[in-house]
Amino acid sequence: MNAYSVKKDWFEPPRYKPRLAVFKFASCDGCQLQLLSCEDELLELADKVEVVHFLEATSHIEPGPYDIALVEGSITTHHDQHRIYEVRAQSKVLIAIGACATAGGIQALRNWGDHTEFLRAVYAKPDVIDSLSTSTAIADHVDVDFELRGCPINRYQLLEVVISFLAGRRPRIPQHSVCMECKRQLMVCTAVAHGTPCLGPITHAGCGAICPRFGRGCYGCFGPAGQANCDSLADNYLATRSNTQTLVPLLRNFNAAADEFRETGDRVDEQSDSGVAK
Amino acid sequence: MTLKKVTDGTHCGKTFFIDKLELEHLIAHLTSSGYTVVGPKVEDNVIVYAEINNLADLPQGYREEQSGGQYRLSKSPNSNYFEFNLGPHSWKQYLFPPEAVLASAKRSGNRWEFDSSTEENGEFANKFAFLGVRACELAAIGVQDRVFAQGTYVDPIYCNRRSNSFLIAVNCTTAAATCFCTSMGTGPSCSRERENEFDLALTELDTGFLIEIGSEKGAAVAELLNSREPNEIELQAGKSLLARAVSQISKQLNTTNLRDILFNNLEHQRWDEVASRCLACTNCTQVCPTCFCSTVTDVTDLTGEQIERTRHWDSCFNLDFAYMVGGTVRNDRRSRFRQWLVHKLASWHDQFDMSGCVGCGRCITWCPVGIDLTEEVYAIRNTPPSKRSLPVQSSDQSKVCAVGKVRS
């Protein structure tokens, strides 16, 4: 057995507990619930930070400033457009969590539609509704210190990000493809072996390749991987195993407005309109 | 049966004939000798490598069709056990596991207590018997032996698992459209020229197996089987089946002067062309039986009481793989694809005195967009390079993620 002595004061608890706040914008709350889902680690986390604003957990809230702000949801109203500036101004570190906060979420599908038409169809009195015609990511409005992907986010990744910022180190959140997670678990490639149009090769890791594990293709809920080559995958899938009717909705999903997915989705959609590919 | 020693004083090189069902005894003998028998098995319409308990686990009567980005399993009119070639798995996953704990420690007062029962310290009970190792895979194990066991830095996990393993090779009697072992000089039949490569080697005939003894360890196991001397017809049948496999191989990789050709064409326009298709998804490196890159991470629990150092398979196609202080060294798909191919086929020679490619063709089949390294090499070899203006500013470069500046 090896033993290394460590300076004793290394273990002394910090005198000041960092203040953590959680904010919600246009979203389903699923991502911030991941924080509550950290059941085993929750008490330990509460020991490390002081949770001062987390409406999903307690109605007791305290004003800023905050050391770490976790921001869920996208910007879809004028009110939120201003509110995110306030949050940013009050926060040392701002971490955007989830597909809504990092790419606009499923509600970004409105970016392709007619906003006033939606308002008319949904609301009895559309004129009392004040909303934007687009749903956009937090980073489109303010500086973001870290973006954690996923719909919903992975709670262990959330813990890793929070811990890393507390420790002042780089979060260990790999930006490679889902394929890597899939292959490390020695799972069968559903794209190659079954001809499924799986988005794994262009999708950011973090989910543990949960869909391929159950024999279905990845549908990209963690958004594009680092330097994802969406065009090549789309062209190949159109030629070998899919069509525009499948591929466009697949790319226009929870991360529809993420740059790489949006550009390729739009291009494939144009092809289908012009009859190049079916 | 008693084995007669051949002229060199060992059993090695001797060939016998066994019935197909005798394979059941072989599996049973190995299991009772403490081996975990691993072999081919059908899972999710693919032949994978998994634990084998009896003959029924083997993929009897299956054949596969492989091409770039496509793999299909189908029923064969024959009832042979080894009519397929290769699935996505390789023996690498047992010798160089995708995830391994290298060290772990617990805080005890103001000291760290290291757990000494890690595999790195030799604490590993599993002995693997690999059933159905193809010739190219034997070569791949040879490459990894060179990488992990014969250099300055020896990997204890690999060495421990490798020295305890028992290899039952199978000669290929068919070839997939993606196979090019003949170009790489690794197959399709297993040869004993490289010393102690296999313990036993099987050639599947319609009537039974020819079983060749490759080591004393193999002889000891073969002695327990009901075998007989093969007759001339059986030996001839075996030879013609091996010849059939050779004749079925259509893919070729011209290796003449390849190292220099690649090094002299580092700015060839083909790299740009292939980068437009490459997904950098890492599938080729994960299915490659020789790729050995890994990453090591230290993980603490929330309290900092428990730390663990783990090793995972990594890939040169990952952005994070070449991340150093200040950024990523290979910051576009072009440079990462070039790194992979040039390392595999050129600088591997400088590093390990051998090629890193054994011609199994897995990277071709399991590439989602079917990139074929033999075609890329052909294009680089046979098209003159055009002048490339430097430096290249890839549009990808603005999208690199780093703490503090996620989007630039």
Image (spheres, grey):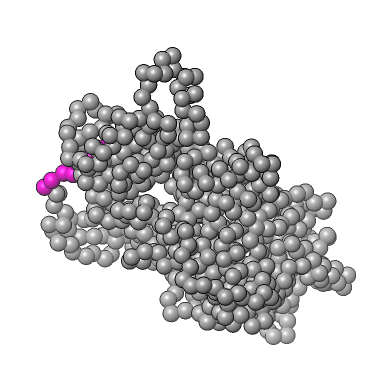
Q: Please give left or right for residue B310 compared with residue B230 in the image.
A: left
Query: In the figure, residue B231 lies in which quadrant?
Result: bottom right
Nearer to me, B70 or A121: A121
Report whether B120 appears left or right of B380.
Answer: left
Count of numbered circles in the view? 0
The image shows residue A215 at horizontal and vertical percentages of: 59, 42
Residue range of the region highlighted in magenta in the rendering: A15-23
Residue lying at the far bottom in this picture: please name it.
B8
Does residue B345 appear anywhere in the picture? no
Residue beneath the point at 73% across and 85% down: B7
Residue B214 found in image quarter: bottom right
In front: B237, or B403? B403
Q: Position of residue B311 (x, y in %)?
A: 42, 61
Residue shown at the point (41%, 15%) measured from the top left:
A125
Image quadrant where residue A102 sits: top left
Whether A167 is among the magenta residues is no
